[in-house]
Amino acid sequence: ARIVRLADYRPPAWRIVRTELAFDLDLDDTVVAARLELTPGESYAPGAPLRLDGEELALLDIAVDGQPLPPARYALDGESLTVHGLVGPCVLETRARIHPARNTRLEGLYASRGLLITQCEAEGFRRITWFLDRPDVMSAWRVTLRADRARFPVLLANGNPVERGTLDDGRHYAVWENPHATPCYLFALVAGRLEGIHRDLVTAEGRAVRLAVWAAPEDIGRCGFALDAIERALRWDEQRFGRTYDLDVFNIVAVQDFTMGAMENKGLNIFNARYILADPDTATDADYLAVESVIGHEYFHNWSGNRVTLRDWFQLALKEGLTVFRDQEFTADLHSRAVKRIEDVRLLRGRQFAEDAGALAHPVRPVQYREINNFYTLTVYEKGAEIVRMLHTLLGEETFRAGMDRYFADNDGRAATVEDFLAAHAAVSGRDLAQFARWYAQAGTPQLRIDDEYDAMRGRYTLRIRQHTPPTPGQPDKQALLIPLRFALYGPDGEPVAAAAEGDAVVRDDLIELTADVHEIHFDGLPAKPLPAFNQGFAAPVRLDYAYTPAQLGRLARIERDAFNRWEALQRLATGVMLRTFADPRAAQAALSDALGDLLDDDAADPAFVAECLALPDFDTLADQVPQIDVDALLAAREELLDLLAEDHADRLERRYHALADLAAGGLDGPAMAARTLRNACLGWLARLDPHEALAQRQFDTATVMTDRLGALRCLVRFDAPGKDAALAAFRERYRHDPLVTDKWLTLVAARPQPEAVEDVRALLASDWWTPTNPNRVRAILGSFARMNPVAFHRADGAGYALLAAQLPGLDAINPQVAARLLGSFESWQRLAGPRRALAHDTLRGLDGKLTSRDCADLLARLLA
Ligand code: HT7
Ligand code: ZN
């Protein structure tokens, strides 16, 4: 099997400075004419053959400089077209036939509900025509689309529309020009029966731009929020990063069959419909926020990814980590910064830390791959964003912004590397970022162990901080990282104490820069031992081990100035109680219960923040804290604690639930959303206490928005309420014609935390609801089962593992990327305790030889290595 290595990177031998494509579009048979203007590249050697990538293409014609090419001058195989005897600049023309309707991989040109759609990142363009399918080959583009006017009234491609007209036989055409140097992974076209809504605005630079959202006619009424969100994203990028839009139109399209969330094609973003369509009857508040965030993410790529693109796929985090950081900041600036940070850290710790600790661990910038699709991971995206956040922390907002300006200016129109990014920040800050760069190279989550000591005689407080990064596959030994550790010391009065720090680390205000394996830092002149708070805002993506007592955590939950850390104190307290790590478990539980009680009584606190505090660590987060995952013990400990706390606070929960009703009845404004979040959190707790199921039933029956309807239904299903089946059926019938809402129903069924969910999922797989060609449907049933239902997936008899494994060969043949993501659910199998480890291992071994795609074969080999 091929292995692509970072160390083997060579600049291209040829460049394609201009590309003209003409498509005769049809669902079954599409003909693609390509005209490539080639010039010698940096590693051009006269006489050397030109090798273009191309897969599943039938060659119709080939010509060079207008002359048909004789067969002796070229060779075709399943992966490439090699042309011999080219000298200097020339024009290569090809015509190919492809079959979109047969394309279930959803890479290249494919059909979805009568639409023709493309998805080219990472290596899908080679399934459209022969090309140098690598991100450092950038071209200007002119694209002509021809199709039947009735079946494909809308014809969209990258860039600006320049011409359109009618043809014979009921056909029409449209021509699009993209003048920006753009790699082929950002190529896109969409053709079909779509409706659009648009808004005209003028950018900060004075350019008139038309923003438009396109969707199937039955969905267009749910696109207004998305259109507003594009405008918010555009304005935010102008203000926060000084980035303006650079074309006359910005189109986004909603499609139902899409492998990932969305794609940032130049001027023509294509979205999974779930990240565009939203109205109160079908979308939860969380869905609305996800729509805004994904729209922001794809829009921000126009600079971080498109204007400045990647030299090679190893640099993926250069665009993805940076763009996730940018979208996180967008949401934080528009909504609650603390709540956003909490949600992001929840994802990071629950999922990315597990990836970093499992069989699939890899650096944010990997050094080799067999299949690049397998590196669109939480590590590249989320840890990649954390690295950018640390840089922001180290440099401060102003210098970071100057570094970003420098990066964009120096690399505009170029294919850049992580080194280019760091060089821009090093240049403006005057800092040497060589050690910081290790974050990109070293896999695994660093562990900080902090001990302290107080010398009352001298009034000296000492911190000893050790860092250690555990071994990961292929990286047994780790080097010390530059870690920015935010901290505060609190005095007996609950106020931060200002004491000068001395020691062997750089300490600037509230920031310690850790660079060595061990540091010792002193603070003098303290009349009493302070209460330390570490890693405020989760400034560094590390595990932190400091022996807090329950009382200290309870106190931090009240006095810490940093909201994230107040939440974090409660998470630590709850984790310690569940994992029984405190010497006095009863005192710990009491401390947790008291702190939660105070929060519930605090009507002045942001209800969304209170709701986050009520959401105690989930199974994934707990599993991440232990060397061996004892599934039953973790699940039982969690349930036991939640039941006890619900009893402690039944009255408070009920009071808040009712008191928030009026506010929660509002629209999409922040306070109303926050009120609904807390109300539904309260309902989740109350539903544990038998008589309160009636409350969930009443909320379900009277709900006017999806947030409340789904929140109530979740409680009924979760606690097996008597009305569960009727409510599920009513929900299913009400939305049976809406695929996205049907997915919500299926998710509830597949994630029901009962061992019998295995049988329920099996029944779904045998029903008409199962559409294995639709990635959303596969995720709703199997993804929810494997990732959100530890009770059933890890069922003691191995039936959960077997159920998933049985589906993988078939799914792999349909859509390898979707199958590979499901296979990734086994990433932590080596840490499973008891017989589950062997059961999971046997299940994986049983798949050997049955998964034929490069995506799944690569992942399986890494899981079993
Ligand atoms: N840059 C995109 C990542 C992507 C993708 C999207 C849709 C289908 C297949 C895909 N492969 C890679 C999306 C993003 O991160 O913005
Ligand atoms: Zn992205």
Image: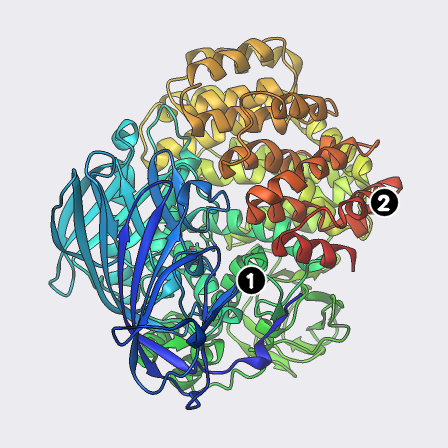
Rendered-image quadrant of the N terminus: bottom right
Residue 150 lies, in percent from the top left, at: 20, 34
Identity of the amino acid at label 1? Ile
In the picture, the disc for residue 431 is none
In the picture, the disc for residue 372 is 1
Is 358 left or right of 767, judged from the image as shown?
right
Residue 130 lies, in percent from the top left, at: 40, 65
Residue 709 lies, in percent from the top left, at: 46, 20
- Residue placed farthest to the right in the image? 834
For the residue with label 1, is its CB less than 8 Å from the closest atom of ligand 1?
no
From the image, tell me which residue sits under label 2.
833
Identity of the amino acid at label 2? Ala
- The secondary structure type at the circle numbered 1 is helix
User: Tag 1: Cα neighbours inside 10 Å, few (<14), some, or many (≥20)?
Assistant: some
Is 767 left or right of 231, judged from the image as shown?
right
User: Tag 2: Cα neighbours inside 10 Å, few (<14), some, or many (≥20)?
Assistant: some
| Residue at image location 68% in from the left, 55% down from the top | 857
Q: Mark 2 or mark 1, which has the lower sequence index?
A: 1
Residue 206 lies, in percent from the top left, at: 11, 63
Between marks 2 and 1, how big is the CA–CA gap?
Answer: 32 Å
Nearest to the observer: residue 800 or residue 418? 800
Q: Can residue 769 be spotted in the picture?
A: yes
- The secondary structure type at the circle numbered 2 is loop
